[in-house]
Amino acid sequence: MPRMTKEEKNLLDSYEKGEWKSVRNLKTEINRYQKIAQATIRKDKRINIRIAAKDLEDIQKKALEEGIPYQTLISSILHKYASGRLA
């Protein structure tokens, strides 16, 4: 058996600890992540912002829970706000 990378080992350990859960409404979740991916692909401008370290940590935690990069989460939030879907 080939050696596992550190990431593969971490995934296996997490699975064996029972940390993984089945996804309800799989088709809905797939659709949701496809929309996030499509929004990510269309990015054509770059900005730099300064935010409080605590806010960034909180955003990174939320992104980890969602299973997406934190920059993608920020972009998604900004997109939703700009398009009127987030008040």
Image (tube, rainbow, N blue to C red):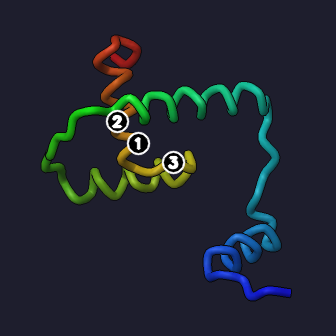
What is the x, y in percent for residue 3? 74, 88
Which of these two is toward me, 65 or 47? 47
Say what amino acid the circle numbered 2 marks.
Ser
Image position of 40 (left or right of 1):
left
Q: Which residue is mark 3?
A: 68
* Residue at image mark 1: 72
Q: Which quadrant holds the C terminus? A: top left
Kindly state the secondary structure of the residue where label 1 is placed. helix
Q: Is residue 36 left or right of residue 73?
A: right
Report if the CB atoms under discs 3 and 1 are less than 8 Å apart. yes
Residue at 14% x, 45% y: name it.
49
What amino acid is found at the position of numbered circle 1 in the picture?
Thr
Residue at figure coordinates x 34%, y 39% from the top left? 74
Circles 3 and 2 in contact, beta carbons < 8 Å: no
Instruction: Give the image location of residue 75, x and y in percent.
Output: 34, 35
Q: Secondary structure at mark 3?
A: loop
Q: Is residue 40 above or below residue 15?
A: above
The reply to whether discs 2 and 1 touch (Cβ–Cβ < 8 Å) is: yes
Q: Quadrant of residue 42?
A: top left
Quarter of the picture containing the N terminus is: bottom right
Which residue position holds label 2?
Answer: 75
The relative height of residue 81 versus residue 17 in the rendered view (above or below) is above
* Alpha-carbon span between mark 3 and mark 1: 7 Å
Give how far apart the Cα atoms at labels 2 and 1 are. Answer: 5 Å
Measuring from the top left, give residue 60's x and y in whole percent.
40, 54
How far, Cα to Cα, is label 3 from label 2?
Answer: 11 Å
